[in-house]
């Protein structure tokens, strides 16, 4: 029995006379590379420095594909927390964040805990991904969880749930303008902000090589040069785009051995990022030399 007077059995929990099915752990592999400062900041915000101290609820802020989710999962795993990932959208309702009812085959009502509530119960990390897409109404239902109270109320199940001592929370947010501006009382509960930026060129190369182990070294060199030139011109092409581009270019080459490496790369960039991205290619004379392993010119064309 815990503070909530609950009994946890495998994938479900008994709270009073209500049985709630728990969410599954997030199992996808995550390997954080580079920038140890952000990882350090995340570890620090989850610390408790005394018995009565409470962990903080950080938000990871950065452009799409810079590695926010990867960082959160990697640090949580390093600290041996079970990880529960919850996707925020503009349709996420307060109940979706807490407990939802489902009708069983026998026409009974049963209850399902969200990944967030599951993390609260078992003492894991909840990563609320893309939190900036969620409405104020949904965030409001978490206000009590994100301050000293550390509980949520489930209106549907009629119960109050207190977070496990080991429960940790982090939300990720894209800094684009297409999303809700969160009200001050929510923002003030989501601190510290941890800002993530594009990795440096060497780290981007390592990340692409890890995700696409079959990538040819010359293709990788051209690709990361392309990405770094684009970043200098404030394009938000991410390492995720880089991974897709490398995968597609290698596939094109694998089916057609005649296709030169720069051609495969250009086709891939065009297909994934669109025509305007082609202007950030390294100079053509450099591109023509497939076997030149030195770093290509970093000047836009
Ligand atoms: N520093 C990094 N270390 C390891 N992998 C990274 C890093 N940055 C990005 N990646 C890789 O890039 C891809 C995108 O990363 P991730 O999904 O974590 O980005 P994100 O910031 O959460 O994006 P979004 O805002 O779209 O959710 C993943 O495949 C991930 O493996
Ligand atoms: Mg993400």
Image (cartoon, rainbow, N blue to C red):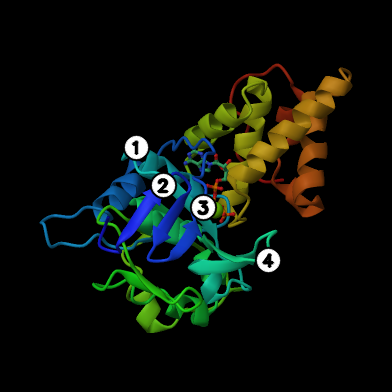
| Observer-nearest of 255 and 280 | 255
Please indicate whether residue 106 sits to the left or right of residue 8 in the image.
Answer: right
The label nearer to you, 4 versus 1, is 4
How far is mark 1 from mark 2, CA to CA? Answer: 26 Å
Please report whichever mark, 2 or 4, sits nearer to the chain's N-terminal start.
2
* Label number found at residue 23: 3
Mark 4: give few (<14), some (14-19) or many (20+) Cα within 10 Å: few
Q: Quick one: label 3 or label 2, which is nearer the N terminus?
A: 2
Dot 3 lies on which element?
Answer: loop
- At which x and y percent is residue 272? 77, 46
**Looking at the image, which residue is at 29% across and 62% down?**
5
Element at label 4? loop
At horizontal 41% and vertical 47% (from top left) the residue drawn is 9
Q: Looking at the image, which residue is at 31% across and 40% down?
A: 79
Numbered tag placed on residue 78 in the rendering: 1
Q: Would the CB of label 2 be found within 8 Å of ligand 2?
A: no
Quarter holding the N terminus? bottom left
Q: Position of residue 31 (x, y in %)?
A: 46, 35
* Cα–Cα span, label 4 and label 1: 43 Å
């Amino acid at each position: 029995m815990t503070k909530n007077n609950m009994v946890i059995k495998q994938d479900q929990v008994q709270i009073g006379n209500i049985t709630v099915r728990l969410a599954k752990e997030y199992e996808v592999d995550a390997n954080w590379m580079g920038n140890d400062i952000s990882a350090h900041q995340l570890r620090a915000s989850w610390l408790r420095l005394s018995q009565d101290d409470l962990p903080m609820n950080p938000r990871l802020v950065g452009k799409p594909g810079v590695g926010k989710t990867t960082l959160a999962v990697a640090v949580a795993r390093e600290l041996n927390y079970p990880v529960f990932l919850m996707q925020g959208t503009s349709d996420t309702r307060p109940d979706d964040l807490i407990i939802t009812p489902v009708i069983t085959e026998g026409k009974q009502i049963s209850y399902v805990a969200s990944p967030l509530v599951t993390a609260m119960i078992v003492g894991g990390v909840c990563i609320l991904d893309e939190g900036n897409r969620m409405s104020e109404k949904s965030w409001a239902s978490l206000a009590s969880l994100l301050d000293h109270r550390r509980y949520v109320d489930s209106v549907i199940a009629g119960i109050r749930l207190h977070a496990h001592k080991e429960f940790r929370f982090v939300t990720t947010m894209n800094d684009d303008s297409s999303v809700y501006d969160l009200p001050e009382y929510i923002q003030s509960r989501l601190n510290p902000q941890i800002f993530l930026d594009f990795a440096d060129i060497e780290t981007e190369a390592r990340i692409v090589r890890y995700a696409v182990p079959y990538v040819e070294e010359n293709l990788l060199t051209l690709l990361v040069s392309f990405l770094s030139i684009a970043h200098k011109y404030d394009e938000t092409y991410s390492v995720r785009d880089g991974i897709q581009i490398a995968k597609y270019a290698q596939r094109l080459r694998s089916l057609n051995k005649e296709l030169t490496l720069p051609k495969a790369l250009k086709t891939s960039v065009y297909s994934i990022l669109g025509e305007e991205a082609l202007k950030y290619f390294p100079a053509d004379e450099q591109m023509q030399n497939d076997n030149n392993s030195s770093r290509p010119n970093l000047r836009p064309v």
